[in-house]
Image: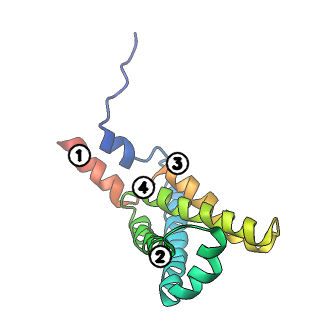
Amino acid sequence: MTVAPSQRSLISTILQSDLSPNPIFQAAWLVVRVVVGSLMIHNGFSKLADVPGFIEHVINVIGLPFPTFFTYLAAYTEIVASIFLIAGLLTRFSALSLLFTMLIAVYFHLKDSGFQIPPLETASVYSLCYLALAAGGGGNLSIDHFLVKILNKQ
């Protein structure tokens, strides 16, 4: 006897977390989401506080075109995606957006300082956290989880 796999909609697949239902794990996952999201908001606001400085010391080193645009894009991504991440709303998309900004930060640190650990460390740890969150989703204590429950009832 074979069992047909349950069909999930694309939205459910994106929103639903496939993590362990263990309550301790779910609480820890929530803490990770809230902590890395809360800490990243600060980085976004610090970019907005000194746009010309960020352009001069980071964007120009990387060599991106449209430096003002990319500064605001990075800052608002870090602020908005972090708020969504904390709430567990569109967690995978938010985590992927933040992962992308952190990979650019890793590239900047490699280009600016080479393989020196202190500059690379923070951006690398953030990158790993966002990669895990993108893979795992928001968990059972997220808005995504409750949206999937609503969608599955319909």
Q: Amino acid at mark 3?
A: Ala
Of tags 2 and 4, the one toward the viewer is 2
The answer to whether residue 55 is left or right of residue 17 is right
**Tell me, what colour scheme is on the image?**
rainbow
Of tags 3 and 4, the one toward the viewer is 4
Mark 1 secondary-structure assignment: helix
Mark 4 to mark 1 CA distance (whole Å): 19 Å
Specify the label residue 151 is tagged with: 1
Q: Amino acid at mark 1?
A: Leu
Query: Closer to the N terminus: mark 2 or mark 1?
Result: 2
Q: Residue at x 82, y 65 (%)?
A: 115
Of tags 1 and 3, the one toward the viewer is 3
Q: Amino acid at mark 4?
A: Phe
Near-viewer residue (95 or 71): 71
Mark 4 secondary-structure assignment: helix
Q: Which residue is mark 4?
A: 93
Q: Amino acid at mark 2?
A: Ala
The answer to whether residue 81 is left or right of residue 6 is right
Query: Closer to the N terminus: mark 4 or mark 1?
Result: 4
Residues at marks 1 and 3 touching, judged by CB atoms closer than 8 Å: no
Of tags 3 and 2, the one toward the viewer is 2
Mark 3 to mark 2 CA distance (whole Å): 23 Å
Query: Closer to the N terminus: mark 3 or mark 2?
Result: 2
Q: Which residue is mark 2?
A: 75
Of tags 2 and 1, the one toward the viewer is 2
The answer to whether residue 113 is left or right of residue 90 is right
Mark 1 to mark 3 CA distance (whole Å): 21 Å
Specify the label residue 135 is tagged with: 3
Near-viewer residue (34 or 81): 81
Question: How busy is the neighbourhood of tag 4: few (under 14 within 10 Å), some, or many (20 plus)?
Answer: some
Considering every residue shown, the one lying at the far top of the view is 1
